[in-house]
Amino acid sequence: MNTSNLSSSSKDALVIANDLAKTFDVSASWLTRAIERKPRQLLKAVDGVSFQIEKGTTLALVGESGCGKSTVARLLVGLYEPTRGGFTFDGQDAHAAFKSDNAKAMRRRIQMIFQDPYASLNPRWTVEAIVGEPLHEHQLIEDEGELQVRVTELLQSVGLSSQDMSKYPHQFSGGQRQRISIARALATAPEFLVCDEPTSALDVSVQAQVLNIMKDLQRARGLTYLFISHNLAVVRHVSDKVGVMYLGQLVELADKHSLFSNPKHPYTRMLLDAIPKLKDTGRARTPVQGEVPNPLNPPSGCSFHPRCPIMSARCKIERPSLKTIQGIQVACHAVEEGRH
Amino acid sequence: MNLLELKNLVVEFPSRHGTLRALDGISFEISPGEILGVVGESGAGKSLTGASIIGLLEPPGRVASGEIILKGQRIDNLSNDQMRSIRGRKIGAIFQDPLTSLNPLYSIGKQLTETIQTHLPMSDIQARQRAIALLQDTGIPAAAERIDHYPHQFSGGMRQRVVIALALAAEPELIVADEPTTALDVSIQAQIIGLLKNICKQKGAAVMLITHDMGVIAETCDRVAVMYAGRIVEIGPVQQVIHQPQHPYTVGLMASIPDIENDRERLNQIDGSMPRLNAIPAGCAFNPRCSQVFIKCKQAKPELKTVDGLTRTEVACWLQSDLTRSTL
C-alpha cells in the first residue's frame, strides 16, 4: 500500500479509496479470436479512482450510464475484486479483510441498498425472513423472540409497522419495498451504506419519503453513505461531497456547494445545464453535442475531448490528472491553464 | 376546431374479482400544433390514456364508455383494420424503450420505407429518399449510409431519433409520446426533447407528451394535465400549474421534487401511496393523503371546474367550491 497517499488524509475519513480500478475481460471466446484474428478486449470500467469519505457524511457519485459508478459501488462492498489499487475502511485494507477468515466482520460493517426494490427482495420470503436473514447470518441474535424484537425495531425505524412482518414483498408499493431493503441493510448495524441509485425506480412523491428517511437515519445513527445517482437534483439534496465520473474516471470532486455554484469541469457544467428546470419554462437549452464514446475504445488524451467546447491540442494527447485547484479537485487542462 | 377530444373516457379491466376502473372519466382536448403534457405517478393512468387514443389497449382492457374524437371523427369504436389506417397516418406513437419499438431483424431503412409506403403512395425510390430526409431531419449524421444499418448498430439516443423519424414518417397530425426520454441519459435527454419540440413545431404536429418528469414538461409543453388514480385532478397552462398549483396533490407533487437550484433540508413528502385500482376510496381518490380533507371529500367525486381568477386552469377539488367546509 502506498503510504504517501494515506498521509494526506484527514484522520476521521472512514473510507479511503486509492487508485481503485476494475478491468473486465470482454473478449470473444478463444476460438473466435483465433479464427477472426482479434486481440483480447479489455473494458476499463473503473480506471484509477481515489476519494475519501469522512465519517457521517455522504459522497455522491454522478455520471451517465456506463461511466463506472455502479462498478465503484460493487468494489466497495466486495462484490468485485479490484484489478489495481484498493480501499481502506476504518484504517484496514478492506479487500484483504474480505479475503481473510474475518470477512464477515468487515461485511457486517458495509452494507448495500440496490436500485430496484422489485428485484432485490425475494418474492417468496416474508418481510420478517428478509430483514431477519442478516441477523441470522451474522449471529447477531440469540433466539426467535429476539429476532422478532429486532425486526420490529428495524421496520419501525423506516416507518413500517410490526404488522408488516408477516407480509410478502408483493403486498407493498415500490417506496415501501425500498424501505424494507433499507431495514435489511441496517440489520447488521453497519457504519457504511453503499446506495446504488436507491430512488431511481420510484415516483417523485415516494422518492421524497425514502430520501427523508435516509437523511433521518444518517443523523440518528451517524451513518456514512456512498450515494450513486444520475439525478443531480437528488444528489444536491443528499450529499456533502460530489464526485463526477466520466468513462471510468473522476473528472471533478468537490464539496456540494462549490460544485453546484461554481462547477469547473466542462463535463460537470454540461451535465448541470442538461437538466430541465422548472423555473425557466420554454427556455431553449443548448443541447450537449455528441454521446458518451464506446468505453472499449476510449478517445486518446482526455476522454471528454470529443464533446468538449473548450478542447485544445493538448487535450487530445495528454490525459489530465485530478489536481486540486482552488480547493476543488478537477481533471482538466483548460481549468488548470485558466482557459475556461 | 380541436384536433383531438376526449369526452368522459372510461377504461375498465374486467377481472375475476370484479371490474377494475383504470380510467374514470377523462376529458380534455388538444388543439392543432399544441403540446399537452400528461404527468402523474406510475399507475395514475397516463400511459393507458395514450394507449386508448392510439387504439392499443391490451385486452381485457376496454373502453367502457366515453368518446375519443379525432378531427370530428369518433375513433374509439373503429375496427382493428380501420384503426390501422389511422395509426401511423394520423396519429404517430413514440414509446419509452427505443430498442423494443424497432424490429431488430430489419434495417431501419426497411422499417421506415415500409411505414411510408403503407400510408403514402410512393415508389421504392421516393420512399427511400423520404426516409433519408427524415433521418437527416432528426439529426442522424451520414443518414444516406446509416439507413442500411440495423437497430443494434445505433446508440440509445440515436435509436430514439430513428423512432421519432418513424413516428413522423407519414406526417401525422398528432404524436403520442409515452416517456420518450425516460430510458436515456440526461445529456441525451436534452437533445431528444429539443428535437421533438422543434420537429413537431416545424411539421405542425400536436404532441401528447406523457412523462413523470416535471422538468421535461416545464420546458416542452404548452399545457399540462396532472393525473391521479385514473382521473385528471388539474389541467392548465404549464406556467400556471407549476407556479400556482391549485390541487393539493399538485402542490405536494411540486414540493416533493428536489430542486437543483436551492438547498432544502427536508423534501416535502406526500405520505402514503396512490391507491390500488381495487381499493380506490369513495369520494375524491386523494382524500386519504390530503392534508386539507373535509367531509365532502369522502362523499362525492369532485369534477373538473375552472378556478376563479385563473382563466384556463381547471381543478377537480372540493376546496375550490364555496361550500362551507365542515372539517373532520
Image (cartoon, rainbow, N blue to C red):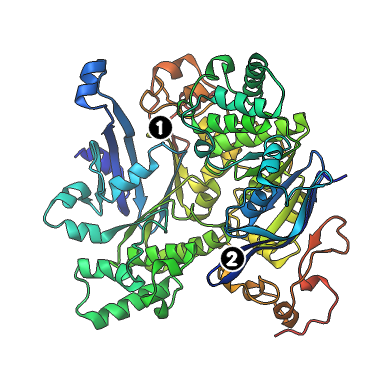
The answer to whether any part of residue A16 appears in the image is: no
Secondary-structure class at tag 1: loop
Q: Position of residue A326 (x, y in %)?
A: 48, 36
**Pointer 1: residues within 10 angstroms few (<14), some, or many (20+)?**
many
Q: Residue furthest left?
A: A101
Q: Position of residue B54 (x, y in %)?
A: 67, 45
Q: Which mark is residue A323?
A: none
Both marks 1 and 2 on one chain: no
The answer to whether residue B91 is above or below residue A225 is above
Question: Residue at horizontal 78%, vertical 42%?
Answer: B34
Q: Quadrant of residue A203?
A: bottom right
Relative horizontal placement of residue A17, taking residue A158 as reference (left or right):
left
The answer to whether any part of residue B132 appears in the image is: yes
Chain where mark 1 sits: A
Amino acid at circle 1: Leu
- Of residue B242 and residue B277, the one placed in the foreground of this image is B277
Relative horizontal placement of residue A271, taking residue A22 as reference (left or right):
right
Q: Quadrant of the C terminus of chain B?
A: bottom right
Residue under label 2, please give it: B14
Question: Residue at horizontal 55%, vertical 39%?
Answer: B186
Chain where mark 2 sits: B
Numbered marks: total: 2
The answer to whether residue B76 is above or below residue B152 is below
Q: Quadrant of the N terminus of chain B?
A: top right
Residue under label 1, please give it: A247
Q: Position of residue A174 (x, y in %)?
A: 48, 62
**Pointer 2: residues within 10 angstroms few (<14), some, or many (20+)?**
some
Q: Position of residue B323 (x, y in %)?
A: 84, 79
Relative horizontal placement of residue B270, taking residue A133 as reference (left or right):
right
Amino acid at circle 2: Pro
Give how far apart the Cα atoms at labels 1 and 2 are: 49 Å
